[in-house]
Amino acid sequence: MPVPDPIAEAHRQWSARWPEHADRMAAVTSVMRVQQLLLARIETALKPHGLTFAAYEALRLLAFTRTGALPMGKMGARLMVHPASVTNVIGRLERRGLVQRRPSPDDRRVVLAEITPAGRELAEDATRALHEASFGLPDLTAEQAEQVTAVLRAVRAAAGEIPRSRRGRAPGVDFPAPPAERGSRSPSGVNSGGSARVASETVFTYGAPQLKFGPGAADEIGYDLARYGARRALVVTDPGVAATGAPQRVADAMKDYGVAAAVFDGVRVEPTDESLRRAADHARATGPYDAIVAVGGGSSIDTAKAVDLLLTNGGDLADYLNPPVGAGRAPAEPLLPLVAVPTTTGTGAESTTVCVLDVLELKVKTGISHPALRPVLAVVDPDLTVSQPAGVTASAGMDIVCHALESYTARPYDAFDRKTPEQRVPYCGANPISDMWSERALTLIARSLRAAVRDGGDARARGDMALAATFAGLGFGNAGVHVPHANAYPIAGRVRGFRPAGYPGDGPLVPHGMAVSLTAPEAFRFTFRACPERHVRAAELLAPGLERPDDPAEHLPRALLALMRDIGIPDGVAAVGYTEADVPDLVAGAMKQQRLLAIAPRPVTEEDLAGIFTRSLRLW
């Protein structure tokens, strides 16, 4: 007796049940065939690691769960196996030393387990292998890829018109509804040999701090803190900003509203794990405090976020670092109110949920990411940026540029798989609100960045750049950033002897905005084909007077290069001390930033990054 084709049988039953939707059912069948191809590639990529899809998915889930409690019903859906088989999957992983079972509760519907270091390492290796296997499709021509995309769009458009039962199951169809991959609630389908239909995201999120903007806004911080019930605040800043007197003026102004303040001026420009621990130790020794105020650039604001986290939640800094560098622990206790007062126009840290740092022992830049880190109030006072040196203005300005460009060209939010509410993350992909902020930021940059670098006393240019930094922060703080920022982490983290003018201290340093910009032209050449119209539109906003080149892929890189030369950014990665021999280490550092690379509009491999770094050694 021949083996039945489940997809064909499902198509037959659906078409008989709803003949008016026969064309759409054919589209569903086509998508399922593509998914079979993808699943086959997944299985092929996992085979050298000795993993089935179910085993890999179990490891991946355990790597990110804090409790180790795995509900068997949901796990069965995620692993594409019957719930009763979940314990068998976990048992096989335990025998290989990849997970460790814990005594289960009386509720047999829950499995308790935790991933071992060997299991985490294997999961990371398998994830890298899957990245290309799952999305590469090298044998699809551009025309075929467009046909698949058209089918997917048609299915999404039709999904709401296909009748479903209240449980999400097609009435009258004998096959079970497919497991909901990654928690999605998709239209009914069929589980054909493990192939499952994955619903696209339909929800994007947007978060931002309260904002106070304008000359003199910093004088009112005491009033705002008093409204939060604060009576004693810690002002966090770096030596260079402290030397301007601004942090002490902010602290003194708080007294008028009954808020006492102490100033900590030991922030390290480009924070490290060691400098953040020192700052937290100082806060513990001189506290208690009931509010934190960051006055400075991104380094001061990020340090304040880490201090707030460690004061309120305890543990070691490494507990909270993003995987795979750290444990990715989420804060369990509320943080103190954090007010961010940027004195540099660029980082956007006053609007974001991330804290960036160098891990010295690993020579890698990483971060902590959680919505609780977002400041409750951003106070943007352009008067505080007037003393910013030209080199700092240029570097911070390029950070604004790349924030706006990367969020504008990011993978769209509806190109991701559907998430459940608890899975939603701050970086959700390009969306209509983030697009609006990015476009406006680019318009202000085009008008004023060169002027702000040329003349720090230009009040209009300073005001424009402060507003551009805020707008870009509101955009990328929700959409996310991708390749240039991922590349910047190892560029800054592995620096040996380079140090630019205008920054306090005497150690080697590649400022964050500068590091981001050095590979940006090549990165946008790489991402161009994923969304050509957005790259062209971005170039027109950033350089409205630039003649459009014959090759549209060159439009945005040329706009960037012209701006970088005009404001004194170094000529490529080699100009800050790297050679071609360093490229493998730079690639390895960038590949660790999977949280960022996942936002890129097209998949990014090690080979892709190697090409971008190599071509960025010299830019002009």
Image: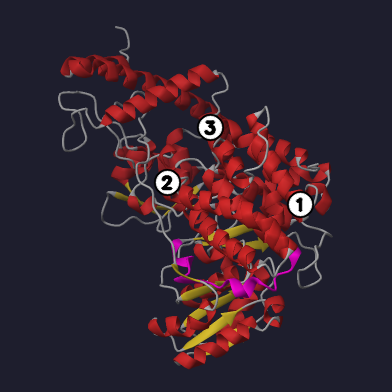
User: Residue 404: percent from the left, percent from the top?
Assistant: 56, 50
> Which comes before the other along the chain, label 1 or label 3?
3
Q: Secondary structure at mark 1?
A: helix
In the rendered image, residue 180 lying in the magenta stretch gets the answer no
Q: Secondary structure at mark 3?
A: helix
Q: Amino acid at mark 2?
A: Pro
Segment colored magenta: 371-391
- Measure the C-alpha gap from mark 2 to mark 3: 37 Å
Q: Amino acid at mark 3?
A: Leu
Report the colour scheme: secondary structure
- Measure the C-alpha gap from mark 1 to mark 3: 49 Å
In the rendered image, residue 390 lying in the magenta stretch gets the answer yes
Q: Amino acid at mark 1?
A: Asp
Q: Which residue is mark 1?
A: 566
Q: Which residue is mark 2?
A: 432
Instruction: Check the image and report above or below for 557 versus 234.
Output: above
User: Residue 2: percent from the left, percent from the top?
Assistant: 32, 7
How crowded is the residue under tag 3: few (<14 C-alpha within 10 Å), some, or many (20+)?
A: many
Between disc 1 and disc 3, the foreground one is: 1
> Which comes before the other along the chain, label 1 or label 2?
2
Q: Nearer the viewer, residue 489 or 153?
A: 153
Between disc 1 and disc 2, the foreground one is: 1
- Find out whether the residues at labels 1 and 3 contact each other: C-beta distance under 8 Å: no
Q: Nearer the viewer, residue 102 or 603?
A: 603
Residue that lies at the very extreme toward the top in this rendered image = 1
Does residue 39 show up? yes
Residue at 62% over, 46% down: 542
Q: Which residue is mark 3?
A: 46
